[in-house]
Image (spheres, rainbow, N blue to C red):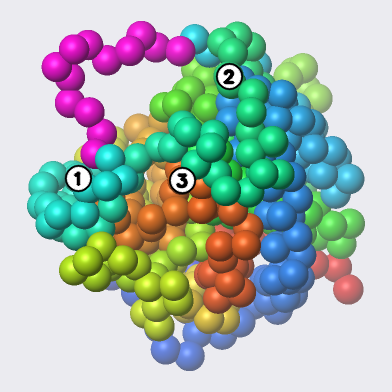
C-alpha cells in the first residue's frame, strides 16, 4: 500500500521512480500543486520563532521535572486550540538506569578539540576537529540568572507523559503518517534547537493541517515525544503500547480507528544550526554557511530501509519544489532519535540540521546540550533553516495524505 500511495502522489510532483530500490529523482520544472502551495504559504518565520521562544519559557524541559510537565500541558493546550482531534497522552514509567560500571568508556568532554576519526552513530565515519558532544550538568555554567532559575529542579523517577493529536482522514481514517519531534531537553538552557526547533515545527504543522478549510484523505498524527534525551523511552513506549492496535476499528462498525495503520514516520530533531565544520582551532563560524541544507536521513540497516529511502527521496523532491531558501540532502545514517524505535515497523526518516553521525558527531554544533542552546544564540538565518524543514515536511505529507483546501 505504501508504494501504491507513493506512486500515485509522485505523479503530481513530477518525479520518477527509476526502478524498485533506486532513489527518486526530481525533474526540472516540476509544477506546483495549488493546495500544497496554499498550505506552505501559511508557514511564517515570526510565528515559528514565537513558538520556539514560548517553549524556552520552560527552560530545558528536562524529563522528570515540573518544567517538563508544564511544557507538556502547554503543548496540549496549543494543539487543542488549533482544533486537532483526539488529543491524548501516552503514560509510562521511567527509572534512571544504574551508573556505568568502572572502566566503561566515557563520553568525550567539551575540552577535547584534538583531531579525531572513528566510527560514528548509525554506521557513519566521523572526522572532526571540534568540541565533541557532551552534556552540561553544571547549573552555574549557565551565565543567565533567569535561565538558571528555570532549571534548578533535578529529575525524579516515576510517571512520564507525552501528548499527541490526530488529523483524521476523511476517506482513509485507518491509514496514518506520524509527524513528530521531542519536547524534552537538557543542558541547563532553553533547549531552543534541541529540540524546541523540532517541537515548534510539529506544532505549526498541526495548526495548519487542522485549519477548518483543510481536508485530507488519510490521517496524520502529531506526536511530541518525552524522554528522548535519556534514550527515547517515550517513543519506545508508544510502539510497545500501540503497535498491535494498528488498523483495528473500535468500536466495530464505528468508522473510528484509535491507532490507524502506520504508513510512515517522520522525526524532527535539531533543525537550526548548519554553520559548517570547525576550524583547525576547534571554532565554528557564527554565521550559517551558504551551503546549509536540510538533512533527510534513513537508516541503512533498518528492516524497512528500502521503503524509508524512497520516502527520504520523496521529501527531497518536495523540498526542491516548495522550499524557499535551503535544499535538502539524503543520507543513510539516521540514529540517536525517536524514529529509530519505528524503523523496523514502518518506513522512518528524520530531518536534521546536519548529518547526525559525521557532522553533528564531528563537532559541527557546539551548542547542543550546553548552556548556549538558548534563543538569543540563533539568527534569522538559523530559524529560516528550520522553517525550510517545515516547508519540506508539510509539502511532502500534504501530497501523501492527498490534501484538499476548500475555496
Residue at left offset 58%, top offset 30%: 62
Q: Earlier in the sequence, mark 1 or mark 2?
A: 1
Q: Mark 2 falls on what kind of element?
A: loop
Q: Which residue is mark 2?
A: 155
Q: Mark 1 falls on what kind of element?
A: loop
Q: Earlier in the sequence, mark 3 or mark 2?
A: 2
Looking at the magenta stretch, what is its main secondary structure?
Answer: loop
Q: Nearer the viewer, residue 18 or 338?
A: 338
Q: Is residue 135 above or below residue 360?
A: above
Residue at left offset 25%, top offset 62%: 282
Q: Is residue 61 left or right of residue 254?
A: left
Residue 161 seen from this side = yes
Q: Which residue is mark 1?
A: 120
Quadrant position of residue 256: top right
Q: Is residue 290 above or below residue 147?
A: below
**Residue 63: x percent and y percent?**
58, 26
Residues at marks 3 and 2, CA–CA distance in whole angstroms: 17 Å
Region of the chain picked out in magenta, as a range: 96-108
Q: Mark 3 falls on what kind of element?
A: loop
Are discs 3 and 2 less than 8 Å apart at CB? no
Quadrant position of the C terminus in the picture: bottom right
Residue at left offset 84%, top offset 38%: 77
**Residue 177: x percent and y percent?**
58, 45
Q: Is residue 380 left or right of residue 121?
A: right
Q: Nearer the viewer, residue 7 or 40?
A: 40
**Residue 293: x percent and y percent?**
41, 71
Q: Which residue is mark 3?
A: 370
Amino acid at each position: 500500500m505504501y508504494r501504491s500511495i507513493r506512486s500515485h502522489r509522485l505523479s503530481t510532483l513530477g518525479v520518477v521512480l527509476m526502478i524498485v530500490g533506486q532513489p527518486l529523482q526530481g525533474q526540472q520544472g516540476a509544477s506546483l500543486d495549488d493546495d500544497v502551495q496554499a498550505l506552505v504559504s501559511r508557514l511564517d518565520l515570526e510565528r515559528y520563532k514565537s513558538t520556539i521562544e514560548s517553549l524556552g519559557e520552560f527552560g530545558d524541559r528536562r524529563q522528570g521535572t515540573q518544567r517538563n510537565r508544564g511544557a507538556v500541558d502547554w503543548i496540549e493546550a496549543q494543539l487543542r486550540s488549533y482544533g486537532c482531534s483526539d488529543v491524548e497522552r501516552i503514560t509510562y514509567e521511567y527509572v534512571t538506569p544504574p551508573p556505568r560500571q568502572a572502566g566503561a568508556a566515557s563520553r568525550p568532554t567539551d575540552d577535547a578539540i584534538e583531531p579525531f576519526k572513528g566510527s560514528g552513530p548509525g554506521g557513519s565515519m566521523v572526522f572532526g576537529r571540534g568540541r565533541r558532544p557532551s552534556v552540561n550538568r553544571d547549573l552555574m555554567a549557565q551565565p543567565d540568572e533567569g535561565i538558571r532559575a528555570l532549571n534548578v529542579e533535578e529529575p525524579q523517577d516515576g510517571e512520564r507523559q507525552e501528548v499527541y493529536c490526530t488529523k483524521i482522514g476523511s476517506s482513509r481514517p485507518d491509514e496514518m503518517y506520524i509527524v513528530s519531534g521531542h519536547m524534552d531537553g537538557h543542558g541547563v538552557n532553553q533547549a531552543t534547537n534541541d529540540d524546541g526547533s523540532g517541537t515548534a515545527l510539529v506544532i505549526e504543522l498541526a495548526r495548519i493541517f487542522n485549519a477548518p478549510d483543510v481536508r485530507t484523505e488519510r490521517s496524520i498524527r502529531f506526536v511530541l515525544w518525552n524522554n528522548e534525551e535519556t534514550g527515547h523511552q517515550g517513543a519506545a513506549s508508544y510502539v510497545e503500547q500501540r503497535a498491535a492496535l494498528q488498523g483495528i476499528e473500535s468500536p466495530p462498525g464505528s468508522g473510528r480507528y484509535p491507532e490507524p495503520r502506520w504508513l510512515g514516520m517522520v522525526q524532527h530533531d535539531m533543525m537550526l544550526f548548519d554553520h559548517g565544520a570547525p576550524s583547525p582551532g576547534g571554532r565554528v563560524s557564527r554565521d550559517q554557511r551558504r551551503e546549509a541544507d536540510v538533512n533527510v536521513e534513513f537508516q541503512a540497516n533498518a528492516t524497512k530501509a528500502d521503503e524509508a529511502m524512497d520516502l527520504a527521496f520523496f521529501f527531497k523532491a518536495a523540498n526542491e519544489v516548495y522550499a524557499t531558501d535551503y535544499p535538502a540532502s539524503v543520507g543513510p545514517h539516521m540514529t540517536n532519535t525517536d524514529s529509530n524505535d519505528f524503523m523496523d515497523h514502518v518506513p522512518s526518516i528524520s530531518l536534521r540540521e546536519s548529518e547526525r553521525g559525521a557532522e553533528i558527531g564531528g563537532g559541527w554544533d557546539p551548542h547542543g546540550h550546553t548552556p548556549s542552546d538558548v534563543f538569543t544564540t540563533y539568527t534569522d538565518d538559523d530559524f529560516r533553516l528550520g522553517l525550510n524543514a517545515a516547508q519540506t515536511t508539510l509539502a511532502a505529507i500534504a501530497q501523501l495524505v492527498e490534501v484538499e483546501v476548500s475555496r
